[in-house]
């Protein structure tokens, strides 16, 4: 089997960049990292297809040897669809996270925070962990005029107004169901 | 008979579509979900009977493609048994959640989305269990994962988003790893069909096999929550709604374990990482259960015991004798049922007492004797007290390991016994505090006896929610699951025989290859 060296190099770069971006705390960058990783994996599938040939349709080539291997193409298509669906979900999640006033950062786990509070004197060991105050510093879209959504301050849940129509099956409490 | 196989996946997906159409009519949704899962259970039972009595697996090629090229669905005894057990669990949890939804309205569970997601989750789980090629296994994983992303962030409250993100990102990484592993395997062998992989894998050099093997194992270990890849689980499970946590705990990690069993026994037969797996299993058992001992909140305790008991299954898998594999499968069945039941029982505790912190809840024995029984039976079962199925499973596992008899095996057996005792300790401590402690005994709420005062700083030790009525259907669903756990003990003889025959068949790859190739 022969494979294109350039594709392999691009694949490696995508994997590296994807892993790097996924390690960020900002969810938007995690999403970008995931997209890069997904594309890297798809490229990998393309690379293992081997030498490209004629489109694998019936009658397109005289012998099967001249055709591309169709199976990796089918696998790649499936994987692209899955990546697409998951990205859509992640976008919704990022939007919701914004709405809730957490910015779009991955927060520290409750259990880890409890542990940190328990031995307050050993704070130096956790010194490099992010604290609540500078959460905002890790997001890309806060504090600029172009920020698409007003970021509320932490746990200020009463101020959230969700204008989206609800699909509640109960008798609606607000007047948005006609 | 083979026409029934694709229905296992098609029915839940169809049901999900119908449930989505009738989004505003809760009763229709409930009816559709219940009927769908009941049908799947019936089909799976028929398939299990057919496969078991004929002793031959059923392979179906979807779309009529010749076997190595098309999508192959493959039902042997192991797949059929797991589909039967998981559809029972899914059905019971569905009834539980119906009761919860009927009592609370849809404040916590937006009903419109819950039923379709739940059915898609079911479809994904069944697809993973009957997948005959690696890529279909990947698709099954993705179906169930995407549905689980929706379910774990259900209602999208702040805490659920926060913990859900951890779960989602970790799952994404494992999916990409799995996909990359599939690409590498295709590149090396030119097939993703499990039967062909089993044939061709031995032609590869050992080091290439090892790389492919470890990539797959890594992806599955994240999903199965094997130490040191287990840290996401206790973070993310406890905040989800009770029925969702119950079904995740019972089934999602087991799908990972199932994939590990298939890879270990049928694909990488002469590439041996059993020593590594044994050490990892020991660490999973011990670290997991120590986490459980340090927790004060019932759902967290259960999440940690879940991690720790995955260790038993990896242990049995790594011993790799037919007896050990049979014991692993029995243990897996036992654990799916018991862990789900415990989470359901804790869901009842949460509603009755308004908290799941064992420091806060007290006097439940007198106040709610039914819940006490429903918690106690699965708890001692998980802790491995005779005569329950937990004891049978562990005993069979240790027995199989002792027959191999290397020093590492004995270390694992000792580790397993210690884990079992510590599990019992963690669960019985919760029992003593929450159920046996009298309401008046300790004055102010939240006062813990001095011996366990170190638990005061544990996460969520002070969380309370409002107390709510428990509809009868929730109690009935939990009671039904407790009955199933007891049935696992009563019918341990025939069930264990079935598991043992599965264990023997797993040693023999030829079965898989032959049947996959002679199918129409």
Image (cartoon, coloured by chain):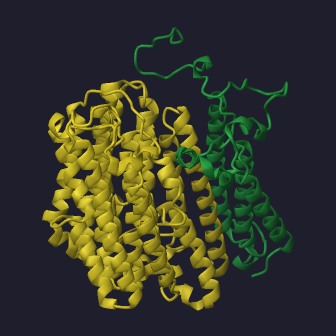
Chain colours: A green, B yellow
**Residue drawn at 73 percent across, 50 percent down:** A24
| Quadrant of the snapshot with the C terminus of chain B | bottom left
Q: Nearer the viewer, residue A74 or A39?
A: A39
Q: Nearer the viewer, residue B254 or B514?
A: B254
Query: Is B148 left or right of B358, judged from the image as shown?
Result: right
Q: Is residue B437 visible?
A: yes
Location of residue A87 in the rendering, given as x and y in whole percent from the top left corner:
66, 45
Query: Is B405 left or right of B107, judged from the image as shown?
Result: left
| Quadrant of the snapshot with the N terminus of chain B | bottom left
Q: Nearer the viewer, residue B212 or B511?
A: B212
Q: Is residue B229 above or below residue B325?
A: above
Location of residue A143 in the rendering, given as x and y in whole percent from the top left corner:
81, 28
Q: Is residue B81 visible?
A: no
Query: Is B178 left or right of A3, judged from the image as shown?
Result: left
**Residue drawn at 63 percent across, 75 percent down:** B186
Q: Is residue B352 above or below residue A131?
A: above
Question: Residue at the left extreme?
Answer: B490
Q: Nearer the viewer, residue A178 or A176?
A: A176
Q: Quadrant of residue A98?
A: top right
Location of residue B62 in the rendering, given as x and y in whole percent from the top left corner:
47, 62
**Residue drawn at 61 percent across, 49 percent down:** A121
Location of residue B179 in the rendering, given as x and y in whole percent from the top left corner:
62, 64
Query: Is B213 left or right of A170, judged from the image as shown?
Result: right
């Amino acid at each position: 089997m022969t494979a294109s060296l350039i594709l392999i190099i691009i694949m490696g770069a995508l994997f590296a960049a994807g892993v790097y971006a996924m390690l960020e705390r900002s969810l938007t960058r995690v999403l970008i990292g995931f997209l890069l990783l997904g594309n890297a994996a798809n490229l990998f599938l393309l690379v293992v297809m081997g030498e490209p040939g004629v489109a694998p349709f019936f009658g397109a080539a005289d012998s099967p040897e001249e055709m591309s291997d169709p199976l990796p193409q089918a696998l790649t298509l499936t994987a692209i669809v899955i990546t697409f669906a998951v990205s859509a979900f992640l976008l919704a999640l990022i939007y919701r996270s914004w709405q809730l006033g957490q910015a779009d950062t991955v927060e520290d786990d409750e259990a880890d925070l409890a542990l940190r509070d328990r031995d307050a004197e050993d704070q130096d060991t956790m010194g490099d962990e992010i604290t609540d105050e500078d959460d905002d510093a890790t997001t890309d879209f806060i504090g600029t005029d172009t920020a698409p959504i007003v970021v509320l301050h932490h746990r200020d849940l009463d101020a959230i107004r969700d204008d989206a129509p609800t699909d509640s099956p109960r008798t609606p409490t607000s007047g948005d169901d006609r | 008979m083979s026409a029934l196989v694709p229905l296992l996946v098609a029915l839940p997906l169809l049901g999900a579509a119908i449930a989505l159409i009738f989004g505003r009519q809760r009763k229709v949704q409930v009816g559709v979900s219940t009927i769908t899962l009941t049908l799947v259970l019936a089909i799976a039972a028929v398939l299990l009977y057919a496969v078991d009595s004929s002793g031959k697996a059923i392979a179906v090629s979807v779309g009529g493609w010749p076997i190595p090229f098309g999508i192959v669905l493959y039902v042997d005894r192991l797949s059929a048994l797991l589909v039967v057990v998981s559809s029972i669990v899914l059905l019971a949890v569905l009834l539980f959640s119906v009761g919860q939804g009927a009592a609370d309205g849809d404040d916590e569970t937006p009903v419109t989305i819950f039923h379709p997601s739940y059915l898609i989750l079911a479809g994904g789980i069944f697809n993973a269990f009957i997948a005959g090629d690696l890529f279909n296994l990947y698709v099954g994983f993705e179906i169930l994962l995407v549905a689980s992303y929706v379910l774990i962030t259900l209602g999208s409250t702040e805490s659920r988003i926060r913990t859900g993100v951890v779960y989602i990102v970790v799952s994404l990484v494992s999916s990409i790893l799995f996909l990359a592993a599939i690409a590498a395997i295709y590149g090396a062998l030119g097939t993703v069909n499990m039967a062909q992989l089993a044939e061709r894998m031995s032609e590869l050099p050992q080091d290439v096999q090892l790389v492919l093997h470890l990539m797959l194992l890594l992806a599955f270990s994240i999903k199965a929550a094997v130490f040191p890849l287990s840290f996401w689980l206790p973070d993310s499970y406890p905040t989800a709604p009770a029925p969702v946590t119950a079904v995740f705990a019972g089934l999602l990690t087991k799908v990972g374990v199932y994939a590990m069993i298939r890879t270990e026994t049928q694909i990488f037969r002469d590439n041996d990482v059993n020593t590594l797996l044994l050490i990892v299993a020991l660490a999973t058992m011990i670290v997991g259960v120590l986490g459980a001992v340090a927790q004060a909140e019932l759902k967290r305790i259960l999440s940690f015991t879940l991690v720790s008991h995955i260790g038993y299954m990896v242990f049995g898998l790594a011993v790799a004798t037919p007896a050990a594999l049979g014991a692993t499968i029995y243990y897996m069945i036992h654990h799916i049922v018991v862990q789900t039941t415990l989470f359901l029982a804790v869901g009842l505790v949460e509603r009755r007492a308004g908290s799941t912190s064992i420091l806060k809840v007290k006097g439940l024995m007198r106040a709610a004797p039914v819940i006490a029984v429903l918690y106690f039976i699965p708890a001692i079962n998980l802790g491995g007290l005779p005569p329950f199925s937990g004891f049978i499973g562990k005993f069979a596992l240790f027995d199989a390991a002792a027959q191999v008899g290397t020093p590492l095996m004995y270390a694992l057996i000792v580790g397993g016994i210690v884990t079992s005792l510590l599990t019992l300790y963690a669960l019985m401590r919760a029992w003593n505090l929450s159920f046996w402690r009298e309401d008046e005994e300790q004055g102010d709420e939240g006062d813990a006896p001095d011996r366990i005062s170190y638990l005061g700083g544990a996460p969520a030790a002070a969380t309370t929610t409002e107390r709510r009525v428990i509809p009868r259907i929730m109690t009935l669903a939990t009671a039904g699951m407790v009955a199933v756990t007891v049935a696992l003990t009563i019918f341990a003889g025939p069930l264990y025989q079935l598991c043992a025959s599965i264990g023997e068949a797993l040693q023999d790859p030829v079965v898989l290859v032959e049947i996959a190739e002679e199918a129409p």
